[in-house]
Amino acid sequence: MHAAAYLEKLNPQQRQAVEHGVSGAGEARKGPLLVIAGAGSGKTNTLAHRVAHLIVNGADPRRILLLTFSRRAAAEMARRVERIAGQVMGANAAVLTEGLTWAGTFHGIGARLLRDYAPQIGLDPNFTIHDREDSADLMNLVRHELGYSRTEKRFPTKGTLIAIYSRAVNAERPLEEVIARSFPWVAGWAAEMKAIFAGYVEAKQAQGVLDYDDLLLYWAQMAGEPQLAADIGGRFDHVLVDEYQDTNRLQASILIGLKPDGRGLTVVGDDAQSIYSFRAATVRNILDFPGHFSPRAETIMLEQNYRSTQSILRAANAVIDFAAERYAKNLWSERPSLERPALVNVRDEIEQANFIATRVLENREDGIALKSQAVLFRASHHSGPLEVELTRRNIPFVKFGGLKFLDSAHVKDVLAVLRFVENPRDRVAGFRVLRLLSGFGAATAAKVLDTVATGPMVPSLETFSPPPRAAQDWPGFVTLARDLKSRATGWPGELDRVRQWYEPHLERLHEDAATRQADLVQLAQIAGSYPSRARFLTKLTLDPPDATSAEAGPPHLDEDYLILSTIHSSKGQEWKSVFVLNVIDGCIPSDLGVGTKDEIEEERRLLYVAMTRAKDSLSLMLPQRFFVHGQSRGGDRHVYAARTRFIPPRILDHFATSVWPPATPEAATAASASEVRIDLSARMRGMWR
Ligand code: ATP
Ligand code: MG
């Protein structure tokens, strides 16, 4: 074995995890490995070292399956692997790391495997993939077709239907149980839902579409067929999973199907950071791992945090210490404390935005690049006032999570055209496109879709005669379809062809046509980096590009920009300076009204995740007034806010409380008064616990 320099930098537990079962021939001799450890203790780093170490010791990178939480994380991991292996192998490492092609999310890898195995499992290999919104639309179509559309007002919405369906699938639980547990207010509709879900599954199969859940579901099904399971499992010598605490039962079934005896399997995670139960993720996966593979599974704990200063870590530990259940961890840091995390009182969200923009620029003056700073928030819409302020001050930013570029109507329209041509049976895409044509109502569109579903697309369209009122746009569309189907324009030129066709519709539909055109130009550029229409559609649906500040324009990769992210999307990442918006009850935990105890505990872990992203400086923002967009509870209004319950008075010592803007005597008085009010309200709530 190479006594590589990179091993020297690891602590003994990390090194043990990296070297676990690596023999001279690079095969894993021992049983499965679980690394369970707190935030910033080097789990991801250890995983990267392990992959590099395997490669250095002769493992074939093409036979390594690396499952991460996002594609961004997979790409980052591949970069690190190359750097580490490069220390021993030099330029060779780059060549080898290129072979690390099976690195991605469960969904992305699932999509690839399904294309390969489609013929063997009765799937059309040209399937298109529905994103959540498309799935909800299809669910809605089915609901209409079954005549449940006008029953009663309280019938579950398409969003609720898809959420329940998805939860049942991912948790591998019966419908009744899912409803009783998480959606009790629609309990009366279970029978109707079953009928709709059955119709939904049939519709997907008839139309050759898969939803996100299918990518896991079909994979898990394959993993349950001995022949297929052996075949797929046999493609990989090593399977490594990061962020294992946020996998669901289906994903666990997939892993067990791939590696039934656990040989070659490595998973890492932190139960205190499990924040995806709304997607049916379950911390049981990580807790049950040793038992499932008993007695061969080995568990390694890491306890030193290398990311944050002691003071940040102490405050984060204080928040999580009140958690009801968790693996006891004793996380410590050697990094000297510079300053305690700040609790910054500001009047409202406008001042909050003001403070952050000011501080971000000051930090940059001090040599902290915008990219080393991040603003995190519980819900995507919380960043609205900040985005306005940043744009006003010309501070470029990129926003992760939440509403994506791809969710905008015009981008979806253009993609729907491509999808419809790729798979003419995809009714959601078809409807979207045909409804753009003037004079096309639902009935006419349905007729067209019925025709193209049964015969070849172009001749079917050519023989279709639309009613006179719909005759105007029709020939242009048929020509477009013919061009695309024949691939006359070639890829990615066909995107320009679609844009050209779409332009009059865009101008008719949207006042800000010029901005939207610019988005479509950007889309065409993105398209250029994919080899084909099919690859483009799959990748884009599974891993949409992040939204950017519209006015500042999309930042180029070498440019400096501030990171805005939902806490959920900030998983696994770190920044020198971190700001967390709205650390108030009602935001974290969100929506007090419906929180069960488990849900509230998950919100606590969410705050822990947010805090542990910070390396040197952490500011938790406390606006004293908060704007609520209320649909049910009294409309839009300002409410008075109280500091989150996860920072009770007894742990306040870990923080430095301040008021912004500072200085004026009145402001100081107002702030101390509000601090008293906040403590009192916390005590009042405590009385009823
Ligand atoms: P999270 O739970 O947030 O995903 P993690 O456990 O995956 O965190 P990493 O992101 O791998 O932690 O590491 C956190 C930071 O600590 C990184 O900057 C990493 O480079 C650094 N680090 C990890 N191990 C060591 C080490 N042995 N020596 C020095 N720095 C280290
Ligand atoms: Mg990590």
Image (cartoon, rainbow, N blue to C red):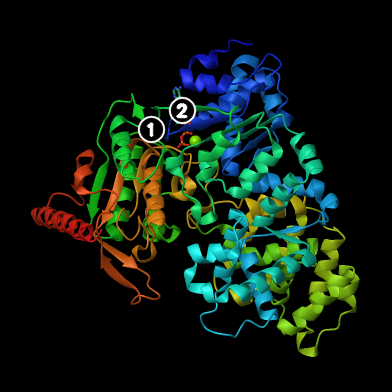
- Give the left or right position of residue 15, taking residue 594 as reference: right
- Give the left or right position of residue 612, taking residue 239 as reference: left
Q: Quadrant of residue 524?
A: bottom right
Q: Amino acid at mark 2?
A: Met
- Give the left or right position of residue 661, taking residue 172 as reference: left
Q: Residue at x 31, y 72 (%)?
A: 637
Tell me the number on the disc at residue 301. 2
Tell me the number on the disc at residue 168. none
- Give the left or right position of residue 220, taking residue 378 as reference: right
Secondary structure under badge 2?
A: strand
Q: Amino acid at mark 1?
A: Lys
Q: Is residue 536 visible?
A: yes
Q: Which residue is mark 1?
A: 329
From this view, report whether residue 24 is shown above or below residue 379: above
Q: Residue furthest bottom?
A: 468
- The crowding category of the residue bearing disc 2, from other C-alpha atoms within 10 Å (few below 14, some 14 to 19, many at least 20), is some
Contact, mark 1 vs mark 2 (Cβ under 8 Å): yes
Secondary structure under badge 1?
A: loop
